[in-house]
Image (spheres, coloured by chain):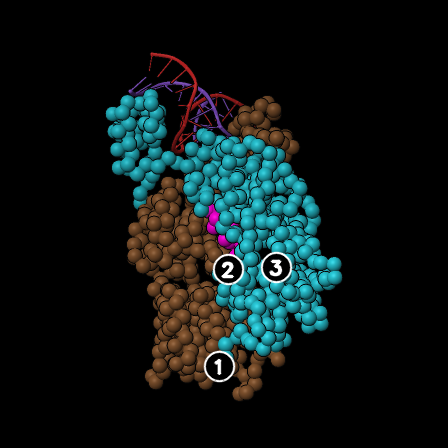
Chain colours: A cyan, B brown, C red, D purple
Amino acid sequence: MKTRITLKELAKLLNVSVSTVSKALNDSPEISPKTIERVKELAALHKYRPNPTAVNLKSSKSGTIGVLIPNIANSFFAKVLSGMEARAQREGLQVITYISNESHEREKQISEMLTAGFVDGVLIAIAEETQRKKDFEHIRSIIQYDIPVVLYDRIDFDMPVDKVGIDDRKVFYDATRDLQNKGLKRIGIATSIHHMGVGKARIEGYKEALREDDTFYLANSAKLESLREKTLKMLLEDKVEAVLCSDFDSTMLTYRLAYENGLRIPEDVKIIGFIRGGLAKYLTPSVSFVDQSPDKIGEKAMDVLISRINRKNTGPKEKIIIDTEVVHYESTQFVKKGASLRGN
Amino acid sequence: MKTRITLKELAKLLNVSVSTVSKALNDSPEISPKTIERVKELAALHKYRPNPTAVNLKSSKSGTIGVLIPNIANSFFAKVLSGMEARAQREGLQVITYISNESHEREKQISEMLTAGFVDGVLIAIAEETQRKKDFEHIRSIIQYDIPVVLYDRIDFDMPVDKVGIDDRKVFYDATRDLQNKGLKRIGIATSIHHMGVGKARIEGYKEALREDDTFYLANSAKLESLREKTLKMLLEDKVEAVLCSDFDSTMLTYRLAYENGLRIPEDVKIIGFIRGGLAKYLTPSVSFVDQSPDKIGEKAMDVLISRINRKNTGPKEKIIIDTEVVHYESTQFVKKGASLRGN
DNA sequence: CTGAAAGCGCTTACAG
DNA sequence: CTGAAAGCGCTTACAG
């Protein structure tokens, strides 16, 4: 077993003091070039690396960033995390993940921990339950301890912190307008996240885009069974020509319902979904989707946080919007009457 | 701004020594009940929590676990991470995530960091490139520093560490046998991970299950275009009755190819895939899949690691197999000739 | 029962 | 140019 060598041990081997070794390794101008060389040589030989914990204690930093993730099984958040990790790595920062599972209680526990000084800054996507209960005291408490906080993705909250996310309202406004311009009239929306900030904003965007004589079709429920019923009604009774789906579940469910009821996509109904591109292209038919650039959201959020930690940015809190784009695949294709997209 | 109170400050307020405060907070029998009460009261009032970095330095522990993830966008790993996090949380341990992106170079960098003492133990799923290059020196180097290592999921390597994963060979052996028992003969396998340990094992299991006069049908390529061609040949020319798909890409691709070529699932071809249940149930038709219990793999791996760190387990290294199960959905349903599963 | 001292592994102002 | 000392915030063996 190898054991890590310490400054003290290096000092003894070199017959100099610990301070000299420390300074030499940090290229202090106080130390003679000759000594610096000697010290560095031996350090390299023994693969010396400073004990991170000791450095942290001395500098009153932890060298780590806490990331609060509501639901890691959601590949959006997984991708966001990936972007954060990439940015943190360039800075030599460690990323500690905390998964709230959308639970208010768990989120409070985590926040409590964080105020004890485990991290230099925190990136948060607020849990669903917390949004419902509208209790953000634990987040404010982190801020009070002067630990920089950046909200990501779920940013529609009134809090004195930086925020990085997308323009949820605009996404569905544009998508709706786009479909209208192509001649569609009966456009509906399916959502299982209407009670969350991002969900609300998406619905609003859609609503705003509706023209005077358009009908507002909404299938909303966090309960799958109920969402199934409402969406089915929209598809079969209201006979909508297109459905905007605001999240993974509503997207996939709409696909299932079309499949189960012999509705052809896109011939009978067009669909725009909110799922990741890696999956979207594979669906049968491939589903047009809103590309949120989750990795960019993660990178930018981490970037903003780092500037706050390093006090490179001491200006007023910012709200940063990452561009989105509707990627059109088969599910919004316009095909000639009678023709079919499907093979055979 | 609130600032965290230290032992020293508490001591001053109480007019006792730092050592007394420390002992009192740790319920030392050396301290009088009265003093303990006084100290704890004030500590609670000021919400005192020991500085984690200081505690770590003193105890020569970091209180953190490093988790190496090859690809977080793969929801399997996201779920595994979730299980790890849950277990770590119960132990008061922090989870630091490192994403290798299947890169050998990055994995080496990370390993190098880890030997500097950032973590008390490491959970690793070895990167694809590392498997190809067969260079595991960096992993051995972690072990040499006496940092406990547990391999998870990708465990088919000869290394003196604990391992937690599934029996990849058995999964496809059983699946093949099951389809055979139901009367199928021409069973094929599609895979984009045949060059990885888990991929190889899955192919082997399938191969072993083949009987004397069965043909071995294999569509394998890490390149999507090539996999597409090979799978297409298997479906259209070889006319296989079932395809075992060993990973996300091969599963989704096989679905696409059936769709594009008018093959009905399961009427014309049955499919067993390797994707998560949350997605499997939504596909059209829903796809029968191998449930790997990723959260259990994560929890167990963390559990084993913790026993090693605490020296509760000093026995020989173990290999722990988590049970899997084929969940049957529509894609393996046996339907009467002429009948169709699809709506309409 | 309480406190002074040493020490975990570093960094840095200060003295020589 | 080098080193002794103090200190980051704790814990703990030891003395009183």
Q: Secondary structure at mark 2?
A: helix
Identified at 42% across, 79% down, the residue is B236
Per the rendered image, the range of residues in magenta is A75-85
Q: Earlier in the sequence, mark 3 or mark 2?
A: 3
The span from disc 3 to disc 2 (Cα, nearest Å) is 20 Å
Residue at mark 3 shares a chain with residue at mark 2: yes
The answer to which of B122 and A104 lies nearer the viewer is: A104
Distance, label 1 to label 2, CA atoms, is 28 Å
Which label sits on residue B103? none
Q: Which residue is mark 3?
A: A178
Q: Position of residue B119 (x, y in %)?
A: 42, 44
Q: Are marks 1 and 2 on the same chain?
A: no
Q: Chain of mark 3?
A: A
Would you call the spot at circle 2 few (<14 residues within 10 Å), some (14-19), or many (20 or more)? Answer: some
**In the rendered structure, does residue A84 fall within the stretch colored magenta?**
yes
Give residue B319's quadrant in the image.
bottom left
Q: Is residue A202 left or right of residue B116?
A: right
Q: Which residue is mark 2?
A: A277
Per the rendering, the mark at residue B268 is 1
Q: Are marks 1 and 2 in contact (CB under 8 Å)?
A: no
- Please give the name of the residue rendered at 63% of the width and 61% of the height, measured from the top-left corner: A181
Secondary structure under the numbered disc 1 in the rendered image: loop
Task: Name which residue type carries label 1.
Answer: Asp
Q: Is residue B101 left or right of residue B330?
A: left
Q: Nearer the viewer, residue B257 or A115?
A: B257
Q: Position of residue B334 (x, y in %)?
A: 52, 82
Judged by depth in the image, the label closer to the viewer, 1 or 2, is: 2
Residue A197 appears in the figure = yes
